[in-house]
Amino acid sequence: MDGREARAVRQRLESLARAGVRQLPRARLAPPPAASLSAPPSAPSVVSQAGAPAGAADVAARQASLEILRGEVAACTRCAELATGRTQTVFGAGRPDARLVFFGEAPGADEDASGVPFVGRAGQLLTKIIEACTLSRDDVYILNVLKCRPPGNRAPLPDEVANCRPFFERQLEIIRPDFICCLGASAAQALLQTEEAIGRLRGRWFTYGTAQVICTYHPSYLLRNPAAKRDVWEDMKLLMARMGLEA
Ligand code: URA
């Protein structure tokens, strides 16, 4: 094993320990993803940063970088309609060195009022999904494609996604998660730069830089279609198995 491989193993073990894993199964924990969509062109810096262990100084540096970026996001006026309509931007929340990131669509009314992602009804359901995965919101990082609430909670427009892309890409570069779970079509299509429907994207593995990506239905969709919770649980079981977490 060379130095780079040893670093990768150490990082994986630290990441597992952070997620509460105390024992390792005999089988390999994280087989390489059966990726079918390649990383977007802007992802190479994600690749180049992978492998660094997240010690206390590193975590503090990531937090500081995120705070600088949070300030840039708060000052953004690229989307005139969204910038004038928002109460505040909703940057993201969680561990700056999270192993797992949940990637949503855009803030709703509750998030616009509080400045925190996924705190409304859909957010409460997301919290339950995270807890079903034996994690807590503090173990993960939660962010959205858009940082401003679209009027009437409409889906993000292509121009708005393009304007926010540098922000979510930089967030992911700083956090360098091992796993990203896209919630719904807007998040999955924005991250993977595809137009495939969420029903076809869910339940499969993709890559974004060094992160393994899984897509599932958005919690808001589950509130309207509770029968789809079964599919989401299947997706979460795939995610947990690859993360080495036990249901
Ligand atoms: N839906 C999202 O996609 N994100 C939020 O933060 C809240 C609801």
Image (spheres, grey):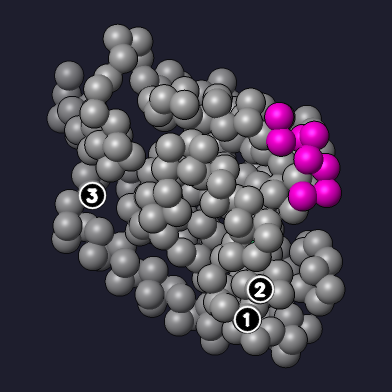
Image: magenta residue range: 223-230
Label 1 is placed on what type of residue?
A: Ala
Q: Which residue is mark 3?
A: 54
Vertical comparison of 144 with 150: above or below: above
Q: Which residue is mark 2?
A: 110
193 over 17 or under it: above or below: below
The vertical placement of 51 against 246, above or below, is below
Instruction: Give how far across and how far down residue 244 sits, in percent.
Output: 38, 25
Residue 113 tag number: 1
Quadrant housing the N terminus: top left
Identify residue type, mark 2: Asp
* Residue drawn at x 17%, y 52% as measured from the top left: 55
Residue 226 falls within the magenta-colored stretch: yes
Q: Is residue 165 visible?
A: no
Mark 3 Cα-neighbour bin, 10 Å: few <14, some 14–19, many ≥20: some
| Pointer 1 residue Cβ closer than 8 Å to ligand 1 | no
- Of discs 3 and 2, which sits in the foreground? 2
